[in-house]
Image (cartoon, rainbow, N blue to C red):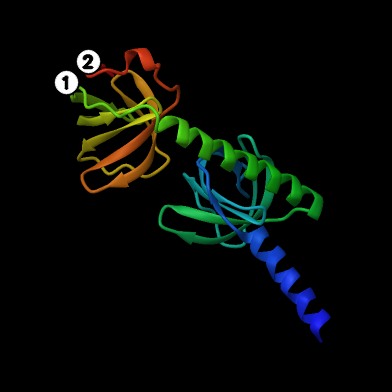
Amino acid sequence: MFLGAMKLLKINEEERRRDQRFELALPGRYMLRDGHEYPCWTLDISPAGVAIIGLSKGSVGERVVAYIDQIGRIEGMVARHFDACFAVKMEAPALKRERIARKIAWLVERQTTGAADNRQHERVSPRRSRTILSTPDGNRHIAALIDISIPGAALSVAAALPVGSQVIIGQTAARVVRQFEGGIAVAFDNQLSAEILTEDVIL
């Protein structure tokens, strides 16, 4: 009985590890049954599934083939819808799941290390805070820069932009990574250089 319980605990531990999701915003593209290819961003990912922001959610149970940057090709089916996103239950043999798990662990570690490095660079409040935020559909919104750091910025803007949206702040390409009351936080596609990060910085 004791050995059986230990074996069950081990299985449950492995399942929890397999299903543990990590917040990673990775670009990619995916195809549904209609054969169209859509751009996307991941919200979170595990070796067993991934939450995706995309233009089409598909139908629950529909097959999905996705190519996620730094993860590679994944296949599965739409498991559920929530907000502007959908969850995909991955279908992959054990060896591929292990490879995906290693990639996720490496990305999470790099993200954590990067966050520690980024905290070494203080955030500055620019003297010239007014800027223009543009979206791919051609809309332009007046925004105010709250603060800027090497990897990103926080802005006050009236537009409701979902996480994962591609935007241009002035002339700087970025994507929305967080929403808060009255504004958004963005990550730059190309990080700023430390030399220009002063109160006189202009985006």
Q: How many marks?
A: 2
| Residue at the spot of label 2 | 200
For the C terminus, the image quarter is top left
Residue 7's tag is none
Q: Nearer the viewer, residue 72 or 76?
A: 72
Residue extending furthest top? 195
Q: CA distance from mark 2 to mark 1?
A: 6 Å
Q: Secondary structure at mark 2?
A: loop
Residue 115 x %, y %: 46, 36
For the N terminus, the image quarter is bottom right
Residue 179 x %, y %: 31, 45
Q: Nearer the viewer, residue 119 or 182?
A: 119
Identified by mark 1, the residue type is: Arg
Identified by mark 2, the residue type is: Asp
Vertically, is 98 above or below 37? below
Residue 45 x %, y %: 58, 50
Residue extending furthest bottom? 1
On the question of residue 139 being in view, the answer is: no
Horizontal side of residue 157 vs 4, given as left or right: left
The quadrant in which residue 185 appears is top left
Residue at the spot x=57%, y=62% of the render? 60
Residue at the spot x=18%, y=25% of the render? 129
The quadrant in which residue 18 appears is bottom right
Q: Nearer the viewer, residue 126 or 54?
A: 126
Q: Secondary structure at mark 1?
A: loop
Residues at marks 2 and 1 touching, judged by CB atoms closer than 8 Å:
yes
Vertically, is 77 above or below 72? below
Residue at the spot x=25%, y=34% of the render? 155
Residue 136 x %, y %: 37, 29
Residue 127's tag is 1
Q: Earlier in the sequence, mark 2 or mark 1?
A: 1
The quadrant in which residue 148 appears is top left
